[in-house]
Image (tube, rainbow, N blue to C red):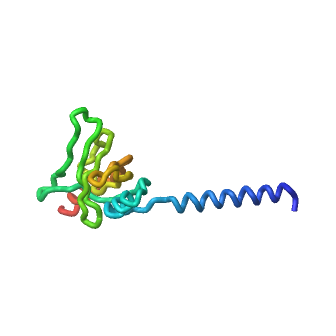
Amino acid sequence: MKKGHILGLGIIAIAIVIIMTSIGDASSYEDFNTALEMKQNGDDKAIHVVGQLKKDESGEVVGLNVREDKVSFTFVLVDNNGTEQEVFYNEPVPADFTRSESVVVIGAYKNEEIFVADKILMKCPSKYQETEVQAAGM
């Protein structure tokens, strides 16, 4: 084989290793219990937790506390196992945050009482949802 072919195969092999490594690091959705166990085991790696904002009987969000300077806030998130956890986010409240259907927080426990989110992803209700409900009622 020519040196060019060997070099090309080497580059392809390195690319495959890099892709496989990045796939292995892809985070899956976990719950707060798993995140807390990771913290207790000394693992501070960011984790994805999916859940819904805590709401009262009338559907209003409860537990949302915006700091006076409006550049950070805390809220209560209920994960898919029903575990309620206070989450701190050091950014302003995103638009339509209280209307979101589900919330994904990416972060870790800094102590055993509060989960600190580095990033928040929201699934907001579809803008067509209300139109569909009205059309179904007619």
Marker count (numbered): 0
Residue located 23% across and 53% down the image: 76
Q: Is residue 109 left or right of residue 77?
A: right
**Quarter-of-image position of residue 126:** bottom left
Q: Where in the figure is residue 4, as x and y percent of width and height?
A: 83, 55
The quadrant of the rendering that contains the N terminus is: bottom right
Q: Where in the figure is residue 131, as x and y percent of width and height?
A: 25, 55
Q: Quick check: can you spot residue 126?
A: no
Residue located 36% across and 51% down the image: 121
Residue located 14% across and 56% down the image: 56
Q: Where in the figure is residue 73, as x and y percent of width and height?
A: 26, 42
Q: Quick check: can you spot residue 91?
A: yes
Residue located 29% across and 65% down the image: 80
**Quarter-of-image position of residue 15:** bottom right
- Residue reaching furthest to the left: 58
- Closer to the camera, 27 or 125? 27
- Residue reaching furthest to the top: 69
**Quarter-of-image position of residue 78:** bottom left
- Closer to the camera, 131 or 10? 10
In this picture, is 77 found above or below 73?
below
Q: Where in the figure is residue 52, as x and y percent of width and height?
A: 26, 58
- Residue reaching furthest to the right: 2
The quadrant of the rendering that contains the C terminus is: bottom left
